[in-house]
Image: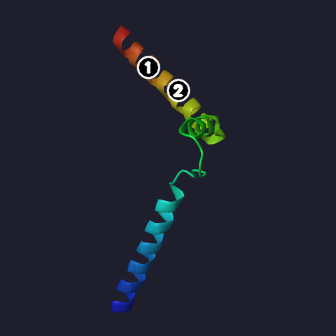
Amino acid sequence: MRNRIIAVGAVAIVAYVLGTRAARVQVKSRESVGHQLVRLWDDPRSRRRRRRAAAEAEKRAKKALRKLRH
């Protein structure tokens, strides 16, 4: 039982450390904030996320408008 608790604790710590590292934005040293924003805006993943969010918002807006009209 004790070994199982230690193993679960070790896995939890490793998962926490890997999770916190994965979510960090990689900032290059001596890079200006403006350049970081441009790089983030031009990132293909963020473009896809913005496009999906816009499509979802448009779909919800149309649904709400239809609901109001009826």
Q: Mark 1 points at which residue?
A: 61
**What is the crowding at mark 2: few (fewer than 14 residues within 10 Å), some, or many (at least 20)?**
few
**What is the crowding at mark 1: few (fewer than 14 residues within 10 Å), some, or many (at least 20)?**
few
Q: What element carries label 2?
A: helix
In the rendered image, is residue 70 in sight? no
Of all residues, the one furthest to the top in this rendering is 69
Question: Hey, what amino acid is under mark 1?
Answer: Ala
Q: Which residue is drawn at 50% across and 54% down?
A: 23
30 or 44, which is in the foreground? 30
Q: Name the residue under label 2.
A: 54
Residue 16, horizontal then vertical, whole percent: 43, 67
When asked about the image quadrant of residue 55, the answer is top right
The quadrant in which the N terminus is found is bottom left
When asked about the image quadrant of residue 4, the answer is bottom left
| Image depth: mark 2 or mark 1 in front | 2
Is there CB contact under 8 Å for labels 2 and 1?
Answer: no
Of all residues, the one furthest to the bottom in this rendering is 2
Residue 42, horizontal then vertical, whole percent: 64, 35
21 or 11, which is in the foreground? 21
Q: Which residue is drawn at 54% across and 39% down?
A: 33
Vertical order, 68 against 2 (above or below): above
For the residues labelled 2 and 1, the Cα–Cα distance comes to 10 Å
Vertical order, 31 against 3 (above or below): above
When asked about the image quadrant of residue 68, the answer is top left
Q: Which residue is drawn at 61% across and 34% down?
A: 38
Would residue 60 be found to the left or right of residue 37 on screen? left
Q: Is mark 1 on a helix, strand or loop?
A: helix
The quadrant in which the C terminus is found is top left
